[in-house]
Image (spheres, rainbow, N blue to C red):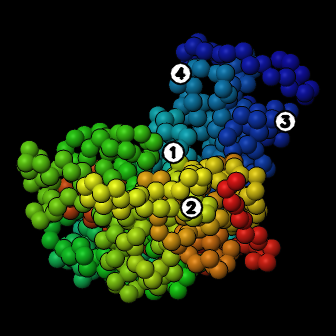
Amino acid sequence: MPDIKSEYIENTTPISGTIDSFTIAIKMASHSPFEPMWDKLVSKYHYLGYKKLLGHRLKYLVLINDNPVAALSFSAPALKLKSRENYIGWSDAQRKEFLSCLASNSRFLILPWVRIKNLGSHVLSRCIHRLKKDWRKHFGKQLLLLETFVDPEKFKGTVYKAANWTYVGQTQGSGKKGSGYIYHGKPKEIYLYAIESKFREIIGCRQKTDIFFHRPPQAQYKLEELKMILSHSQWHEGLVSDLNLTQGDIQTMSDELVKFHEQFFDCYGRIEHRRLAMTYLSGLISNAQAKSVEPIALEFLGKKSVRSLQRFLKSCKWDHEAMVMTHQRLLSEQISEPDGMINVDSSEFAKKGKESVGVARQYCGEKGKVENCQSGVFVGYSSSKGYGLLNGRLYMPEKWFNEENKTRCEDNWVPENLTFQTKLEIASDLIDQVKNSGRYQAKWIGCDATFGSDHNFLDALPEDLYYFAHIRSVCKVFTRKPKMEIPEYKGHGPRSTKMKLLPGQPEPKNASEIAQSPKLTWMPVVLAEGTKGPITAEVARVRIYLSRDGLPVGDERWLFMRKNSDGQIQYAISNAPRRIKFADLVKASIMRWPIEQCFQEGKSYLGMGNYEHRSWPAWHRHMIFVFLGLHFLLRMRLRLKKNSSVNVTNGLPPVSSCHEASITDS
């Protein structure tokens, strides 16, 4: 064998074959000349790296023909582990007495150039056989159990399953920080191996059965028992990554979720509906990969409840409108303020089938092209206190109202009195409903270019609110009002009242041409504080007249342009008065962000577009639960005072330093 005391030189020649083709040696690396080699390999090739292990620890190196092929370590176990404690069944006093009889398989590495079938389970079994004697020899303790943790995003636990380890549940998704714990939302699977089959007799305990694998037995279907399930469910890491949750925060969120949902109990027709509703809401918020009815029911209630949850969302009688109104009332108490903005936008959901309600080949925003999809129109609200989605309605393409689709509408429970409405008409109805409710104070109405590019839509908006409407770069505008004349009447036919530009008057320009003018003054601003530092942009504003059919239309408006750090320019128009502060327009431009943030969080974390519902009622009921998920998260941010604000006024420049641009056509 080479001099192992000298610096180890890696030999990465591939090693492959069957387990019986090799002579495998397992060496103790701890406190031996092998230890530097073990440290180097684990630091370089294990996904967790290596740092000094705490408490008792033993390291093993696996060799074939003097070349390392694997490395393992065993060290002190976790102090507290709910699933482990339930599986063992010991009391707190017994845990303190016998915890030193447990060890954790803290590292297990098969080197990347080694491809030997069954090597992992083989060396694990042999190491455990050695470990029983080595642990007693070095630390004077009889080992009863081993534990290990598997990251399900990276591994399937195949080696441990093959070596007869037992899966007992998941961690709470927390990591040690200082003297406490921070919730990171990435739970790991827990596996245990009984070295002594009669370990419970030695400890003097019995396995618990009340809460196992993070939830009560699936046969328990009462509402109070469901609350126990929810208190042990795992939060989706994307929803809580910015909260730096402690263990106390997690318990607070679990308790608050139950209290929050109880405020909607009167909306349901039966007590059983409360349990199903709370299940669905919790499933959307959880870290489950699938956010449709069947996996949620299987996770929380069991196979027999799949049909019940499906019926609840499609056909059970409960007051959907009361649900929406309760949600809006509770959210308004949190975020309504005089300078708020009512936002309207559409969002699409790609679908492969042709039978889902409202599905058709139409423009799909998330695909950026015409695609088979459903499209919804949504209304939201934002202020410096927070933001949320308030309501939404599925857009039904006009062809769905043809006689040939009558049966399809009936099968999908489309209301008989529903008539065709454009997205613009749906948006107007949703805005009116929010404004007429009187719950949301507002100064602004915001919308994207789908709505902002339509003159009729803008003209129909409430006159007591300013709009901030995105437009397309090709939108035609005048930077000053041209002179016009009525064509001379020559006595033939009816008199024409159509205006036309006088000779020599300027033609309208695209908004993008205005942005390229050398006379335009761009002002740098800090829009908000992001996780990686300030979010900056350059902005400019110009007084303009909109163009329709080549002629100026309506009163003078603002053209607002924002050039982002990537050079892309966004365009918006506003009917705000000439004397409005520059900073107020910048603030309005940022208050359009939250509805996009709602769509991003909804689709990424809450299953907003991952539903499998086909019917009209189920689509809208699914969406209200997405709204409630966003609503609840905002309440927790406010409750925990972590990232609760939209921060729309952060870093705006003083008004005195902002120069108003003025461009005239030459």
Q: Amino acid at mark 4?
A: Lys
**Residue at the disc numbered 4:** 117
SS under mark 2: loop
Residue in view at x 89 percent, y 22 percent: 3
Residue 605 at x, y = what percent? 46, 56
**Residue at the disc numbered 1:** 152
Q: Nearer the viewer, residue 630 or 307?
A: 630
Question: Looking at the image, can residue 15 be seen?
Answer: yes
Disc 3, disc 1: CB below 8 Å? no
Q: Nearer the viewer, mark 3 or mark 1?
A: 1
Q: Amino acid at mark 1?
A: Pro
Residue 211 left/right relative to 47: left
Residue 257 at x, y = what percent? 42, 75
Where residue 36 is drawn, which disc sits there?
Answer: 3
Disc 4, disc 2: CB below 8 Å? no
Q: Between disc 1 and disc 2, whose residue precedes?
A: 1
SS under mark 3: helix
Q: Between disc 4 and disc 2, whose residue precedes?
A: 4
SS under mark 4: loop
> Distance of mark 3 from mark 1, alpha carbons?
30 Å
All told, the count of numbered labels is 4
**Residue at the disc numbered 2:** 482
Q: Assess disc 4: are there few (<14), some (14-19) or many (≥20) residues with their C-alpha within 10 Å of its C-alpha.
A: few
User: Most extreme residue toward the right, as rendered?
Assistant: 6
Residue in view at x 57 percent, y 30 percent: 120
Residue in view at x 30 percent, y 64 percent: 425
Q: Between disc 3 and disc 2, whose residue precedes?
A: 3
Q: Between disc 3 and disc 1, whose residue precedes?
A: 3
Q: Nearer the viewer, mark 4 or mark 2?
A: 2
Q: Nearer the viewer, residue 209 or 108?
A: 108
Q: Nearer the viewer, mark 3 or mark 2?
A: 2
The N terminus is located in which quarter? top right
